[in-house]
Image (spheres, rainbow, N blue to C red):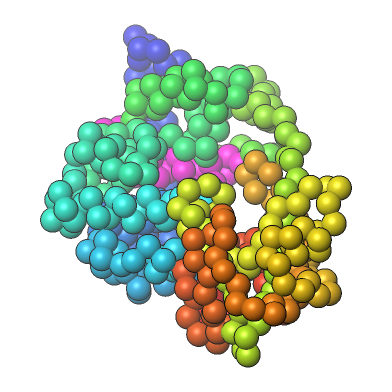
Amino acid sequence: METPDLPFSPKALDELRKKVLAWYGRSARDLPWRRTRDPYRIWLSEIMLQQTRVETVKPYYHRFLERFPTVEALAAAPEDEVLGAWSGLGYYARARSLHRAARTVVERWGGELPADGDALRELPGFGPYTAAAVGSIAFGLPMAAVDGNIARVLSRWLCLEGDPREPARMAELRRRAAELLPTERAGDWNQALMELGATLCGPRRPACLVCPAAAHCIARKEGKEGVIPARRPSRERPIVRMAAALVRRGESVLLAKRPPEGLFASLWELPSVEVDEADDPREALARYLGPEVGEEIGRAEQVLTHRELRVVVYRLHPPRPLGIREPYVEFRWVDPEGELPGGLSSAARKALASAGIRFAKDV
């Protein structure tokens, strides 16, 4: 008798689960968040790993926990301090959601992350994947997690063509994942599929010869492992051009803070103005800030999710104090040898570096 909605017999499904879990037990990478049962640390790792490589996350994970070792410590910290600890890791909405969720956990559950799937899904930053990953790994809840790696693995196992990021296909993958889940080892199973997708079943040239699931993978049987899942065609990103001002006062540099909404929300950067391709960036900067615009001293580029940012940095010689102006909510003089005032985006860091400015304590 076939397991409902799955192309595996009960015997084959049992064999698949055993092989994959045994492989994970032998081959799983030794990662710091796999050495703990602390729900807070597991939660932090899942947030940091979203759209970010493991090797990039490791040092941030350790430093963040040194600064905020508990949910209570994170909840009590000002947002600028949290963004400063996150600075350079990117996708800062993650840090803001983590911070808000920590405050909710302290206020509603006394600092203990709830061991309940519905309660987890109510927290800021807890989408279907994060709730299932944290719920299953930290608490053993029978919740199937589907991230990009797992979606690719399941698409190949089940030979599901099309784009797994499309809502209808993702809904199907989540349903299939729940059917495949060995509920008594949900956390290990979810991690095993993540590991499989990260190490063997990658986007290009999957390592089928050493894959524990090769005998059960329908895409491999049909010779489609190289074309499933379908790759989304790349989209041209619009270019955003910025003129940035480097203003010095002794050793200090003037930084500006973005508002809490929009591009680079609540992050710090050199005071900048967006310019059209036909504009003279020096004239645009002079119109915006008013002081004398000096020579060009740096250029930086940063590819964002939906756009490409190009920044030209100019030295400014202000004849009078600069007043705060939109879109910024605060200006501050910052000593590069001292503490960061908060989070710096990778684009801001690159612009500063191109002008010869690096912060000694920038993580």
In the rendered image, the quadrant that contains the N terminus is top left
Residue placed at 31% from the left, 52% from the top? 100
Q: Can you say whether 139 is above or below 165 in the image?
A: below
5 left or right, relative to 159: left
The residue drawn where x is 54% and y is 59% is 328
The percent coordinates of residue 220 (x first, y second) are 62, 26
Residue 326 colored in magenta in the image: no
**Residue 96 locus on image (x, y percent):** 40, 54
Q: Quadrant of residue 177?
A: top left
**63 relative to 282 in the view: left or right:** left
Q: In this view, does 231 lie to the left or right of 188?
A: right
Residue 360 seen = no
Out of 174 and 336, give the one closest to the viewer. 336
Q: Is the magenta stretch mostly helix, strand or loop?
A: helix
**Which residue is located at x 56 percent, y 49 percent?**
263
For the image shown, how many numbered marks are present on the structure?
Answer: 0
Which residue is at the front of the view, 52 or 23? 52
Q: In which quarter of the image is residue 333?
A: bottom right
In the image, residue 362 lies at what x, y percent?
54, 76
Residue at the limit of the structure toward the front, as seen here? 320
- Most foreground residue, 362 or 8: 362
Query: Is residue 234 at all visible to an observer of this figure?
Result: yes
Q: Does the magenta stretch include residue 186?
A: yes
Residue that appears at 72% across and 48% down: 240
The span shown in magenta is 182-202
Q: Is residue 313 left or right of residue 342?
A: right
Image: 215 above or below 261: above
Tell me the quarter of the picture where residue 229 sits: top right
